[in-house]
Image: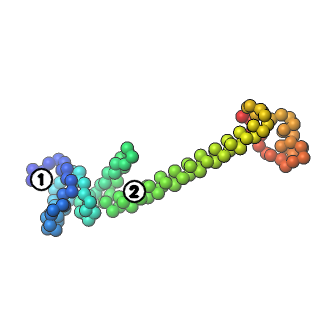
Amino acid sequence: MLRRPDVLLLDEPTNHLDIESIQWLENFLSTRANAVVLVSHDRAFLNNVTTRTIEITCGRIYDYKVKYDEFVTFRKERREQQLRAYENQQKQIQDTEEFIERFQSYQSRAGAEPYQATGEDRAHRSGRGGQSALAVEVRL
């Protein structure tokens, strides 16, 4: 570390260090280190020395240019946003499947593949057949 390397790779650097040694290491990394790749479970240490956190998850890389605690907040917000997007997607898929089922069952009752409305059906749907009007004409 005294040679000022371009990059320091540190895996759990605070393990087995006393408080004074941790403080010295924090100061050194904050003021003299060029770049540090750090793996640690010590959140206080991470907050004191990091200005950027990179998360690698599910084959993707997320770069947060903030201290560790802010990263945790941003990650939580991103995951909640992803969950909402997933739930909206699932709802849209379900609505589409229900729509398809409705018209497939209508086709099977009509006995036509693919279904094409006849003039009599159009009259029936428009209200001239004695039932309520349907404002949509569907051709599949």
Task: Determine the CA span between mark 1 and mark 2.
Answer: 32 Å
Image label count:
2
Q: Which mark is residue 1?
A: 1
Q: Which mark is residue 75?
A: 2
Question: Label 2 neighbourhood size at 10 Å, few (<14), some (14-19), many (20+)?
Answer: some
Between residues 67 and 85, which one lies in front from this camera angle? Answer: 85
Name the residue type under label 2.
Answer: Arg
Question: Residue 104: horizontal and vertical position, in percent?
Answer: 71, 39
Does residue 84 appear in the picture of this structure?
yes
Residue 46: image quadrant is bottom left
Question: Label 1 neighbourhood size at 10 Å, few (<14), some (14-19), many (20+)?
Answer: few
What residue is at 44 percent from the left and 55 percent from the top? 79
- Mark 1 and mark 2 lie on one chain; the one further toward the N terminus is 1
Residue 58 horizontal side relative to residue 23, left or right = right
What residue is at 72 percent from the left and 34 percent from the top? 140
Between residues 47 and 113, which one lies in front from this camera angle? Answer: 113
Q: Residue furthest left?
A: 2
Name the residue type under label 1.
Answer: Met
